[in-house]
Amino acid sequence: MDILFASPSAIVDTWETSGRADRRWSWFADRPGTKEREDQSRRVLDPRHFMGILMMCIGVICLSMSDAIAKYLTPTYSPFQIIFLRNLIPLPIAVVVAVAAGGAGAIRSFSPATHLLRGILWLSAAVLYFSGLRDLPLAEASALVFVAPVFITILSSCFFREKVGCRKWLALLAGFAGVLTIIRPGAETFQSASLLPLVSAFFSALLLLSARYIDPRESGWTLLLYLNSTSALLSGLMMPFVWTPVRIDDVWLFLAIAVVGTAGMTFMTQAFRLAPATIVAPLDYAGLLWSTLLGWLCWNETPDGAALLGATMIILSGVASLRH
C-alpha cells in the first residue's frame, strides 16, 4: 500500500516535469554528447538523489511493516479502528514536525474542501485494503494495490485529456493482464477479497490526482498533516459502532503501526522532494519483496507461480508507465 502514503503533489508534479528529460538518458552517457546529456548525467549523480533513494528504501520498509501489523490486527479489530488509532497516536507529533519544518503556515489550508475530499478517498482506500488483508496473502494484496498507476493513466486520459501513446497503452494492458493472472477470475482459487485491493487502488489513484486541485501555496507538510487529521476525524466518527477494547498485548502493535506508518510517510515524502520520481518511484515496488518476506516469516505464506508472474507483470507495467 506504499503508494497511498507518498506525497501526492510531489508524485504528480515530478512525473510531469521529469519524464521528458529522463527519456533522453542513455547508457552511453560517457560518450561525447550534447550539453543536455551532460547536464542529465550531473543531475543523476547529484548526492541529493542518493539521499532520496536511501529515504525511499527506508520508507518502503516501514510501510511494508505497517501493512504486516495491520494484517495481524484485522481479525480482531475493525479497519476503521486500526486507521483511527494509526493516525490519532502520532497526530500531535505530526503537528509539531509540520510546524517546525514548514512554519506556522503549515497549519493553514487554502483548500479545506479538497482536503476533506482527499481524507474521504484515503480512508476509503485504506479500509478496503485492510479489509482485503484479512483474507489474502500479504504479497498478493500488495501486488494488486500497485495497479494504481494504471488507473492514474486511464483517469488522466479521460478527465485531463492527457495524451497516452501506444507504448503506454501496451504497458497498461500488461498491468491488467498481471491483475487477472493473480486473481484468476472463474478459477477455483478465485477469492472475492481480491477485488478489495483493486478498488483500493482506484481510490488511491483518485487521491493522487486530487492533488492537482490543492492550492499551490500549500506545502507537502500541509498535505500530509491534513491527510492524517481528516482521516483520523472521519474514522473517529465510526468508533461508536466498531470500537473493540484494545487488549494489553496489542497496545504495542498499535504504537508500532503508528510509528512505522508515520515514518514511512515522512521518508517517502522527502524522497520525492530530493530526487525525481523516475529515480525513486520504481523503488516503491521493492515493497513487494518485503511483503513476500514478511508474509513468509509471519504466516508461512508462499506465493504460487501465477501470483509471482502476475506481480512481475504489474511491476513491469508500472515501471514502463513511469518511463513513458
Image (tube, rainbow, N blue to C red):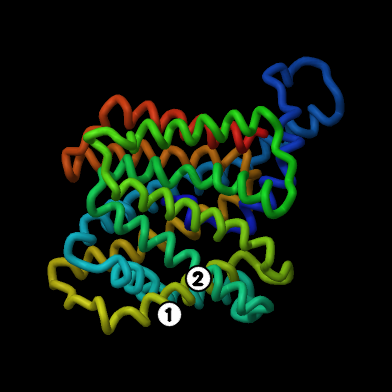
- Residue found at x 42% / y 37%: 179
SS of the residue under disc 2: helix
CA neighbours of label 2 inside 10 A, class few (<14), some (14 to 19), many (20+): many
Circle nearer the N terminus (1, 2): 2
Q: Quadrant of residue 181?
A: top left
The residue type indicated by label 1 comes to Leu
- Is residue 147 placed above or below 132 in the rendered structure? above
Where is mark 1, residue-wise?
Answer: 233
Q: Can you give x and y, in whole percent of width and height, for residue 21 in the image?
A: 76, 35
The residue type indicated by label 2 comes to Gly
- Is residue 153 placed above or below 42 in the rendered structure? below
- Residue found at x 42% / y 48%: 198
Residue at the right extreme of this rendering: 35
Q: Can you give x and y, in whole percent of width and height, for residue 24 in the image?
A: 75, 28
Where is mark 2, residue-wise?
Answer: 119
Q: Can you give x and y, in whole percent of width and height, for residue 12 in the image?
A: 65, 52
